[in-house]
Image (spheres, coloured by chain):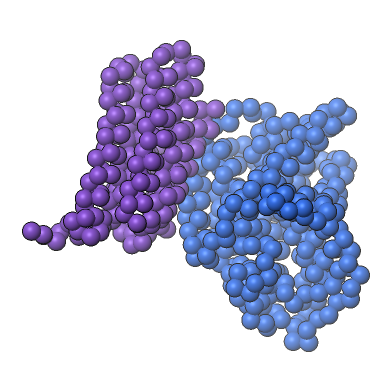
Chain colours: A purple, B blue
């Protein structure tokens, strides 16, 4: 069960690394977050600890329901629904992602915890999306994938206090809210959300 | 090496029943789209109609068009005898995965040659597209064969399905390889994200463009071989990746249970294809080719996971 959910996370992250339309990117993110929530739920069911349930509930509420709403709202407001010029094209992104996951799993072959390995794979994919894309909204989604990796990473640690878990989840939520507003203002100031145009100075 | 008589019977069943399964697939698509659709026996009627007609061959075409369709049908029927269907056993039999792969390569190369042979524009275009997609799909098959070899230490498909039928909880890499193989099936059989099997619009067709010049019994052979090919690929998927419940002893109850589970799994696979074909749109040729690097990345990840861990 958990293995199948981890598979969904890996496949959705590889899919997200090359897709252009923001709607599909958001869809992949929803799938990934739902899988993480279900993993936390299953772990809570197996171990009987309450904080897993809380984490599952928080993940599903913030990442499956609220964040897609914020992203869709800002996409509708900006009238930008796809990323046309990529710094690394889709072909190379997919191959880079595959190689990155390969290196992550290869370096960590001593550890028998699949959560840590998948978490580090998600770090790599998130960083790739942040570096190789030009639109600010795609970079934000890259950061959210990175943040999913952090959640998976800390699921694997048994002694994690509840405050830190809640902190991680709310940090992601605040990021989505703030970036939603920020991207709108960036668009208003520079007439685009392409991060290249930040170099142009304006009075 | 021991060839059981039962292997022969179950393979004959596949050859005979594959048009029925395609009819079920078409019926499922019709129901999902909200119309009644033709009877599930319609592919048999089509084949009967085509076999009654004579064959007309363009006077520009060479011997390739004369012998091509029958070679295609022969190679496809051969593959049906190399796979376990709902019974497998410990003993190794003829079922090497490489033989299967190269038998499908024969089918592919003759289809491409038939497209080029009649010197029509559509045929050449379809052939070049088919070769382009096949070029990308070929490494995937090699990745998957490598994966299955590392997993079970064998190339024999009967043995692979016997070993995998004892496993209940599969690992992560097994699921990843399964998804890779599903995309590979869609690419090799000209299904929807890559090619639309229903259309005859010249800009979008690939598989249909190559056989546009065939008629009568030749067309019937090629159509039947494409039906069998899809079913054989689905059976490879079922018996290599989800072989739980396959009969491993020759008793009546085990065979009956194996047959029942097999039919359920096959109908489930057909329903999956029907859902994919009704919800997805056919992607542009070069956009469709972008799916392959993703799939190759999945294959790399699967092999890394099973080899390192």
Q: Nearest the camera: A101 or A86?
A: A86
In this picture, is B89 found above or below A16?
above
In this picture, is B69 found above or below A52?
below
Residue A127, quarter of the rendered image: top left
Percent x, y of residue A104: 37, 39
Question: At 33% across and 62% down in the image, what residue appears?
Answer: A85
Question: At 77% across and 60% down in the image, what residue appears?
Answer: B225
Percent x, y of residue B128: 59, 72
The reply to whether residue B260 is in sight is: yes
Percent x, y of residue B305: 48, 38
Question: At 78% across and 84% down in the image, what residue appears?
Answer: B58
> Which residue lies most toward the top here?
A48
Q: Is residue B85 left or right of residue A132?
A: right
Q: Nearest the camera: B173 or B230?
A: B230
Q: Is residue B203 left or right of residue A27?
A: right
Percent x, y of residue A46: 49, 16
The reply to whether residue B147 is in sight is: no
């Amino acid at each position: 069960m958990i293995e199948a959910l981890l598979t969904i996370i890996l496949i959705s992250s590889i899919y997200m690394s090359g897709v252009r339309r923001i709607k599909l990117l958001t869809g992949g993110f929803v799938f990934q977050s739902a899988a993480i929530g279900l993993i936390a739920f299953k772990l809570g069911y197996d171990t009987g600890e309450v904080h897993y349930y809380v984490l599952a509930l928080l993940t599903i509420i913030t990442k499956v329901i609220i964040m897609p709403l914020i992203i869709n709202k800002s996409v509708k407001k900006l009238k930008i629904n796809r990323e046309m010029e990529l710094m690394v094209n889709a072909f190379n992104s997919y191959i880079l992602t595959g190689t990155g996951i390969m290196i992550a799993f290869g370096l960590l072959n001593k550890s028998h915890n699949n959560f840590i390995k998948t978490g580090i794979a998600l770090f790599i994919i998130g960083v790739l999306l942040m570096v190789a894309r030009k639109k600010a909204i795609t970079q934000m989604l890259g950061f959210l994938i990175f943040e999913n990796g952090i959640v998976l990473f800390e699921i694997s640690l048994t002694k994690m206090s509840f405050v830190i878990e809640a902190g991680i989840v709310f940090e992601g939520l605040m990021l989505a809210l703030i970036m939603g507003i920020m991207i709108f203002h960036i668009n208003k100031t520079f007439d685009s959300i392409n991060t290249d145009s930040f170099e142009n100075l304006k009075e | 090496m021991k060839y059981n008589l039962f292997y022969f019977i179950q393979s004959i069943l596949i050859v005979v029943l594959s048009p029925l399964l395609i009819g079920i697939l078409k019926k499922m698509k019709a129901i999902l789209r909200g119309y009644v659709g033709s009877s599930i026996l319609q592919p048999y009627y089509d084949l009967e109609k085509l076999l009654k007609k004579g064959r007309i061959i363009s006077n520009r075409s060479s011997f390739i068009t004369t012998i091509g369709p029958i070679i295609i049908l022969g190679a496809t029927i051969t593959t049906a005898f190399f796979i376990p269907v709902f019974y497998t056993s410990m003993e190794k039999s003829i079922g090497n995965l490489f033989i299967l792969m190269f038998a499908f390569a024969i089918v592919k190369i003759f289809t491409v040659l038939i497209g080029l042979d009649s010197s029509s524009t559509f045929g050449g275009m379809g052939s070049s597209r088919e070769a382009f997609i096949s070029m990308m799909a070929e490494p995937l098959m090699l990745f998957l064969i490598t994966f299955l070899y590392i997993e079970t230490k064998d190339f024999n498909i009967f043995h692979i399905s016997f070993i995998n039928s004892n496993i209940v909880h599969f690992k992560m890499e097994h699921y990843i390889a399964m998804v890779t193989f599903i995309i590979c099936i869609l690419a090799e059989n000209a299904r929807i994200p890559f090619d639309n099997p229903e259309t005859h619009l010249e800009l979008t067709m690939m598989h249909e463009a190559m056989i546009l010049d065939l008629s009568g019994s030749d067309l019937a052979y090629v159509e039947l071989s494409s039906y069998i090919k899809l079913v054989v690929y689905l059976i490879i998927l079922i018996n290599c990746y989800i072989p739980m419940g396959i009969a491993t002893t020759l008793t009546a109850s085990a065979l009956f249970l194996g047959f029942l589970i097999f039919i359920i799994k096959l109908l489930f696979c057909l329903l999956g294809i029907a859902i994919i074909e009704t919800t997805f749109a056919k992607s542009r040729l070069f956009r469709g080719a972008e799916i392959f690097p993703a799939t190759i990345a999945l294959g790399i990840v699967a092999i890394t996971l099973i080899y390192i861990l």
